[in-house]
Image (cartoon, rainbow, N blue to C red):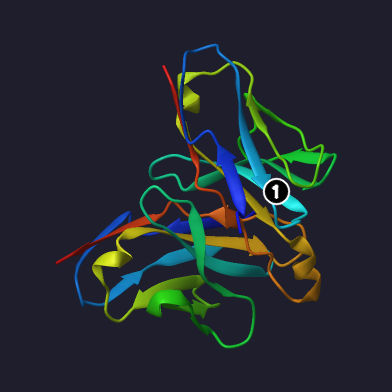
Amino acid sequence: NAGVTQTPKFRVLKTGQSMTLLCAQDMNHEYMYWYRQDPGMGLKLIYYSVGAGITDKGEVPNGYNVSRSTTEDFPLRLLSAAPSQTSVYFCASSLETLALFGGAGELFFGEGSRLTVL
Amino acid sequence: AQSVTQLDSQVPVFEEAPVELRCNYSSSVSVYLFWYVQYPNQGLQLLLKYLSGSTLVKGINGFEAEFNKSQTSFHLRKPSVHISDTAEYFCAVRPKAAGNKLTFGGGTRVLVKP
């Protein structure tokens, strides 16, 4: 099982460039998330989606954009890269209907995309 | 809103010694509690979770955690660590209402020494 797949794993950008981080999941999960991880700061939520066509901002959305045209895919766009966006980015998904039946919607994470902006 | 504080950023420990990682949270609503582990250069994976019932929760790889509602804590323990437990550990909470998102602590890096 592939689970959550992120590409690329590594990327170096120059300030002002744009790029898209790809995320795909094959578990038919409704919810998908993008987090960034900075040393000592834990994970901060950038954007999330509760289903195809529905997205919403998290804690740190500035400088990013997302779309969700299918259940499987949730790309993250950096509009004009800045050094402050140097980070490790994680995509995750969860089956939220579990929460309606006493579950807790465990998150499944990809392996991360390490981005450096010079 | 919720917040999670992991009181130790780094914990060095010798192999076969016990380890405890501390986690305190703040929330105005009832929450689910989680511990995730991140091995070097990998994504996060679930270690254990507390939903309800018994306050002592057992997870994978011999880890357990105890929920203390009065102290709003969810400390993680392992009685005897292995080299392979070297990783970063994250405590997280989410409101019980469906559709809400996880809030993570800052992480605790565990380095197991031989």
| Residue B60 appears left or right of B78 | right
Tell me the quarter of the picture where residue A41 sits. Answer: top left
- Left or right relative to B48: residue B15: left
Q: Residue furthest left?
A: B114
Looking at the figure, which quarter contains the C terminus of chain A? top left
Give the residue displayed 63% in from the left and 35% down from the top. Answer: A22
Question: In the figure, B41 relative to B81: above or below?
Answer: above
Q: Residue at x 48, y 51 (%)?
A: B43
List x then y, in percent, for residue A31. 74, 52
Residue B96: image quadrant is: bottom right
- Identify the residue shown where x is 75% and y is 61%: A96
The residue wearing badge 1 is A32
* Place of residue B79 in the rendered image (x, y in percent of width and height, measured from the top left): 30, 81
- On the question of residue A117 being in view, the answer is yes
Q: Secondary structure at mark 1?
A: strand
Residue at point 39% right, 80% down? B62
Q: Position of residue A47 (x, y in %)?
A: 68, 39
Residue kind at label 1, given as amino acid type: Met
